[in-house]
Structure formats: C-alpha cells, structure tokens
Image: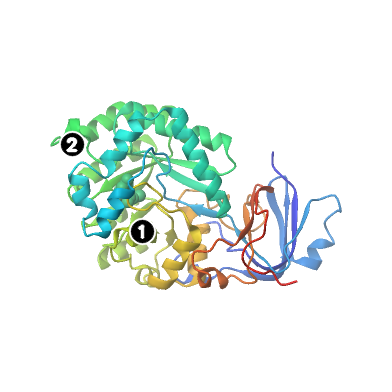
Amino acid sequence: MNGDLFIKNASQIITVSGVAAKRGKEMGDIGVIEGGAVLVQNGKITAVGKSPELEARVDGATETIDAAGRIVLPGFVDSHTHLVFAGFRADEFLLRTQGASYMDIMKRGGGIQRTVNDTRNASKESLERSALNWLDHMLEFGVTTVEAKSGYGLDRDTEIKQLEVMQSIDRRHPVDVAATFLGAHAVPPDYKGRTAAYLEFLRQSVMPEIREKGLAEFCDIFCEKGVFSIEQSRIFLESARKMGFYLKIHADEIFPLGGAELAASLGALSADHLLMASDQGISNLARKGVIATLLPGTAFCLKEPYARARHMIDRGCAVALATDFNPGSCATFSIPFIMAVAVMQMGMTIEEAITAFTLNGAAALMRSHLIGSIEPGKWGDMVVIDYPSYGFIPYHAGMNPVQLTIKKGNIVWRREKGTCYPVSP
Ligand code: NIG
Ligand code: FE
C-alpha cells in the first residue's frame, strides 16, 4: 500500500533533483532547502518547498512528521551488492591482513568458489531468510533500493535459485531489489581450462530462461586477468544485450586490463570498481556517459589503492557509490562508512558522495526517473537523519544517524531509542 505523509520543519531537505545521472561538476549540486517540507500522496511526492507554504496546503488528517533539527535525503540506492549467499569467509579476510592476496586465495580454491559451494548446498529458504535479514539491516542505514547479483551458483539450478530468491525478497520486503545475472563471476571447476565453453553454456542454456522468466534486468561479468578476458567479456556482453539485458562490468578491479575502455566501447550502463582504470578508460567512460560505480569498501578491505574518484569527476564522469556487500572482498553495507571513505580517501566532496548514493545509484539501475531525488513525481523514498546539516555525515564517520526510513510514503523503519546525536530542541 502506498502512503500519504507530510514531513515538515526539516533543517535541510536535500533534494538532489534530476531525472538522469549527474556528471562532473553537476554532482556537487544537491539542492538544499532550509526549513523544508515534503508532501507524499499515494506513495508519490507531490510537493517540496519551504515548510510554512506547504503546511497551508495539507489537511490535518495526513500523517505528519516534525523533522525539526533533522535532515531529509532521498533514500539511499545501493547499486552493487552480492547479498544472496551462504557462508562466511572471515578466515580469508584475516589471511589478507597477513599479506595473502585476493587472487591467490581464489586460485587456491577459496574465494568465490568457496561461497559457490556453500550457496549450492543451501536451501532456497535459508538463502531467503539470510537475505531478508540483510535487507532489514540495510533499511536501518536508510537504503530503499538495492541491487543484488547472482554468481554464487555457476550452474543453471543455483543461479536460478539465487535469482528466484531476489524476486521473492523483492516482493516480501519494503526494500526494492533489482536483480543482476552474474553467472560469469568465475569459471567453475568442471569447465576448468574451457572458459569460452562455460560462457557459451551460460548464453545458450541459462540466460534465455532468465529473460523469459523476467528474473534479471542486468547482466554483469567479472572481467579480470585470470578470470574472463576483454575479448571474452565483449562477446558475452554483446549477446547479453541482444537478449535484452542492460550491461554492467566488474572492470579493472585488480589488474589494469582495459575494462573501462571495454565498458565505454560497449556503451554499458555502468563500469564497476575501476580501481586500476587508465586515464584513457576514464575519459572514454565520461564521453560515453557510462556510470562509474565505485566501491570504496572493497579497496579498503582488500588493502588496494582507491579508485580515482576525483579525477573521474573532474573529467566529467557520473560517479555512483555502492557497498559491494559480499562475503569475500567487502562484508559491510554501512552507508556512512562508505561515504566517509569516499570523502576522506578519494577526494569526493560530501555533496558528490550524496549524489553518488542517491540519484546516480538510481541511474545505474535505470530508475532515475522514479527514485533518487526528492521532487514531485518521484516515489516518496526518503531517509530522515538525526543531524542538523548534511556536513555531519562524514564528520561522524561510520556512525549510523538514521532516524526514519520511508518507502513510498510509508515509514518502514523507525529508530526507537534515538541516535547518539543530541537533537537540538
Ligand atoms: O565485487 N570481484 C568479484 N566479485 C566480488 C567479490 C565476490 C567474492 O569475493 O565473493 C567483488 O569484489
Ligand atoms: Fe562486486
């Protein structure tokens, strides 16, 4: 059920307004209304402005939130996660702190393959229970839309099982879940040395069924040295596009392979990670309007250098931020943590980080006409935060100040006890 809601007296409403990804300098323009109000009717935003003006238009029966001393932002869009999985890999994390590399662990049969084994053995019900639990906690961080990738099956049944779990949790939970097929996440042992044959199997025997059943909108590939090459990725993604998928690429995450250049030449929707992207690749992404989805939590957990966000934005790229939540390379979905890293380590301004986690995240999921900003016509997806101004977000690095999460005009999560931040009267 879509809701009616009136939020008034907010110290700041951060509108972000726009219906397409903001690029370059535009990312700093987040449209702040001091003393603002928002009206949501039947799930959609119908008015945004100064509080006294809007108050005069609202009847007394509408549920009203007094947001005095607090800020209101568009609900966060986490546009890159791998949230449907079984088992954990904390021991690998510890090995990495002692110097082991992500790819070495993967070559020794750990890494993605280990989660594949656990996910194949897990029942659909248990995967669903665990994913619903993650979504509950994502709501606490103000996330209202999340993307989830398959890729822990690497066989027909388990890939479909993961995608069916996403479809089911999307229906059952207030957070919207956008599904991506990532069957090309690794080469499974039974195809060892036959990478092209594995991709052919996916194309012929798995992807048509996924499209037919409407189980995924996006298709992704782990284009990486020792996994899928540039040429294999190109051929694979071109046929995915023909089947109707929007394209995403895990690009230049660990080795500078030219994934950014590939994403640009394909006109992909997004190129993700980009830790090692070249100058040329970055210019090409900017020119072709491919969204550069950056995942600072992964660089942090892999102890790798951060993607060059400042350079990308200065070259005119549209940058999105996401968590990459998964059991291997980044096991956190804390939005304030990721934002603080982006601001402190990657040269992004807080305004750019906000755009990156809202409108640009929505654009990376083909939803920027529906969500990602606070303006008439968009869904009433918002987060009320217990800070007097948005500048407090990176300042209180990693702390969770979310007071209310609102989905389509309904309050779907409310902090019962108040945050650590003392709200001014
Ligand atoms: O985005 N690099 C490939 N995939 C994930 C990690 C998956 C895993 O380690 O389980 C990533 O980093
Ligand atoms: Fe990822």
- Specify which label sits upstream in the sequence, 1 or 2: 2
| Numbered tag placed on residue 240 in the rendering | none
Position in image of residue 345 (x %, y %): 38, 71
| Residue shown at the point (37%, 53%) measured from the top left | 330
- Count residues near mark 2 (Cα–Cα under 10 Å), then give few for <14, some for 14-19, many for 20+: some
Q: Please give the label number shown on residue 196.
A: 2
Question: Is residue 387 placed above or below 163 in the rendered structure?
Answer: below
Q: Is residue 274 above or below residue 387?
A: above
Q: Amino acid under label 1?
A: Lys
Q: How far apart are marks 1 and 2 (CA)?
A: 28 Å
* Residue annotated with mark 1: 288
Name the colour scheme. rainbow
Query: Which residue is at a point 42% across and 48% down the rendered structure image?
Result: 81
Q: Which residue lies furthest to the right in this view?
A: 60
The quadrant of the image that shows the C terminus is bottom right
Closest to the camera, between mark 1 and mark 2, is 2
Tag 2 secondary structure: helix
At horizontal 53% and vertical 53% (from top left) the residue drawn is 368
The residue drawn where x is 71% and y is 72% is 424
Q: In this view, does 32 lie above or below 160?
A: below
166 w.r.t. 295: above or below: above
Please tell me which residue lies in front, 269 or 358: 358
The spot of residue 315 in percent (x, y) is 36, 70
Q: Residue furthest left?
A: 193
Foreground of the two, 284 or 84:
84
Does 95 sit left or right of 345 as displayed? left
Q: In this view, does 416 lie to the left or right of 130?
A: right
Amino acid found under the numbered disc labelled 2: Ala
In the rendered image, is residue 425 in sight? yes
Q: Are marks 1 and 2 in contact (CB under 8 Å)?
A: no
